[in-house]
Image (cartoon, helix red, strand yellow):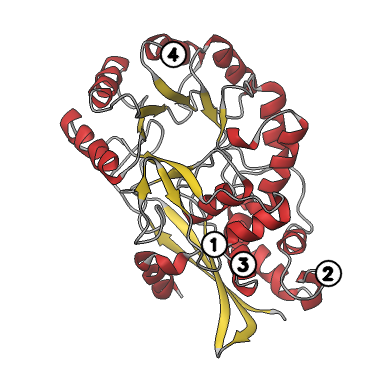
């Protein structure tokens, strides 16, 4: 049993949308395909992966370091102890050989894309959906088949007014989502408050709105926004300031009666640990959004969850960034608090299977072996065209 090829490509996810910090007009993502020599019923097993939106494709590090290391490793070095399947933890150690500590902003993305493809092929070889593999190995065989999901959108579009924003949010509510999220910090405070009030008018008592500043604010601005936002029944106030400025995060948290959500731009165990140590977050109220596909993959994410146990955090406070099928399986298999969703943006990577339905804010995870990319036709077309 061995890996026979690992292919990568850079795919554009061009869009005119922007948040408070960046626009996505030049954004790319890495897609990965892992081929193996495992054949059943005449079909060879392959796995697919990609990195989440918000970080660019990592072709250089994939081609020059991580893919060559895996392909050069003795086949048995990448297998589990029984020799019956590949071991993503051993593969992770192989990829990270000769890498210095620190510097987690780019290589973590490359490793995360490969890691996703590895877990996809591991679950396929096991003939199980990934959530079941994870529940059996890491969660006492307990899985949440119905997972809370919220609809992320509300970006700043050229010429998009409040009416267009509300029309977008209504499509999400009509799809069955009961929590939606919009961006703030890209226009004036007064304009953002008008956008918030317009969306809140759409919601009933069982529906919620979250807001996301994408790390834009300094302390003065973050608190000024906070003072205004606390007048509204918001689900959370997301990433008000730079995620690695732990003292700034702690200062904002100390002032906030609203839940704070952060972590999507923290890409390693040690950075996550420092956020928990020094970021002032409250285990009973706040949310953690670490993204496995950007932070060295599911292998590192499991280590982060173990660290959270040590610091008294429930895994239910984790709602990963990413909005795709990998994080959905992780949320289901490990019993997290839910998952992000991108119903209308970052296609074909965002969202779930073509026939997936949202019922009262939850989605039922498919039993398709692997991560279930094959259930998403537009994404499979992208993979086929890329490789």
In the drawing, does residue 368 fall left or right of residue 81?
left
Name the quadrant containing residue 7. Answer: bottom right
- Please tell me whether mark 4 sits on a helix, a strand or a loop: helix
Whichever of labels 2 and 1 marks the residue nearer the N terminus, that label is 1
Q: What's the distance in space between the residues labelled 1 and 4, CA to CA?
A: 40 Å
| Secondary element at image label 3 | helix
Q: 52 or 81, which lies in front?
A: 81
List the residue tagged with mark 3.
123
Q: From the viewer's perspective, is residue 382 above or below residue 100? A: below
Q: Residue furthest right?
A: 81
Determine which of the numbered discs, if any, sits on residue 81 in the image.
2
Q: CA distance from mark 2 to mark 1?
A: 32 Å
Crowd rating for badge 1 (residues with CA inside 10 Å; few <14, some 14–19, many 20+): some
Local SS, label 1: helix
The residue that disc 4 covers is 226
Which circle's residue, 3 or 4, is located before the other in the chain?
3
Foreground disc of the pair 2, 4? 2
Residue at (33%, 53%) from the top-left corner?
14
Percent across and percent down for residue 330 are: 58, 51
Characterize the local packing of mark 3: few (<14), some (14-19) or many (20 or more) Cα atoms within 10 angstroms: many
Badge 2 local density, few (<14 within 10 Å), some, or many (20+)?
few
Q: Position of residue 291 (x, y in %)?
A: 56, 44
Q: Nearer the viewer, residue 245 or 332?
A: 332
Label 2 or label 4, whichever comes before in sequence order: 2
- The one of 235 and 70 positioned closer to us in this rendering: 235
Would you say residue 157 is visible in this rendering? no
Marks 1, 4: nearer the viewer: 4
The quarter in which the N terminus is drawn is bottom right
Mark found first going from the N terminus, 3 or 2:
2
Of the two numbered discs 1 and 3 in the rendering, the one whose residue sits closer to the viewer: 3
What residue is pinned by disc 1?
Answer: 59
Assign a secondary structure to mark 2: loop
């Amino acid at each position: 049993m061995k890996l026979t090829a690992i292919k990568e490509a850079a795919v554009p996810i061009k869009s005119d949308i922007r948040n408070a910090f960046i626009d996505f007009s030049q954004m790319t993502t890495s897609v990965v395909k892992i081929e193996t020599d495992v054949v059943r019923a005449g079909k060879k097993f392959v796995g697919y992966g990609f990195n989440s939106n918000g970080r660019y494709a990592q072709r250089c590090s994939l081609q020059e370091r991580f893919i060559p290391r895996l392909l050069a490793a003795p086949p048995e070095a990448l297998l589990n102890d029984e020799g019956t399947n590949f071991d993503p933890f051993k593969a992770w150690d192989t990829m990270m050989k000769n890498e210095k500590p620190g510097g987690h902003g780019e290589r973590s993305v490359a490793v995360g894309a490969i890691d996703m493809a590895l877990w996809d092929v591991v679950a396929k070889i096991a003939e199980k959906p990934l959530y079941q593999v994870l529940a059996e190995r890491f969660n006492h065989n307990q899985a949440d088949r119905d997972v809370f999901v919220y609809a992320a959108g509300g970006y700043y579009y050229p010429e998009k007014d409040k009416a267009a924003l509300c029309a977008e949010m209504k499509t999400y509510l009509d799809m069955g989502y009961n929590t939606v999220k919009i961006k703030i910090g890209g226009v004036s405070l007064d304009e953002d408050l008008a956008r918030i009030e317009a969306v809140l008018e759409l919601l009933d008592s069982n529906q919620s709105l979250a807001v996301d500043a994408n790390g834009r604010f300094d302390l003065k601005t973050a608190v000024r926004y906070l003072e205004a936002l606390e007048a509204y029944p918001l689900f959370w106030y997301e990433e008000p300031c730079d995620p690695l400025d732990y003292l700034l995060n702690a200062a904002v948290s100390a002032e906030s009666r609203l839940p704070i959500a952060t972590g999507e731009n923290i890409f390693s165990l040690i950075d996550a640990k420092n956020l928990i140590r020094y970021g002032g977050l409250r285990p009973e109220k706040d949310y953690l959004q670490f993204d496995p596909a950007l932070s060295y993959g599911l292998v590192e994410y499991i280590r982060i969850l173990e660290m959270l146990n040590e610091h008294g955090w429930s895994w239910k406070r984790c709602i990963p960034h990413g909005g795709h099928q990998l994080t959905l399986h992780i949320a289901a298999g490990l019993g997290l608090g839910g998952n992000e969703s991108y119903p209308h943006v970052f296609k074909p990577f965002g969202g779930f299977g073509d026939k997936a339905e949202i019922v009262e804010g939850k989605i039922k995870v498919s039993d398709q072996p692997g991560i279930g990319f094959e259930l998403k036709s537009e994404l499979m077309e992208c993979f086929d065209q890329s490789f």
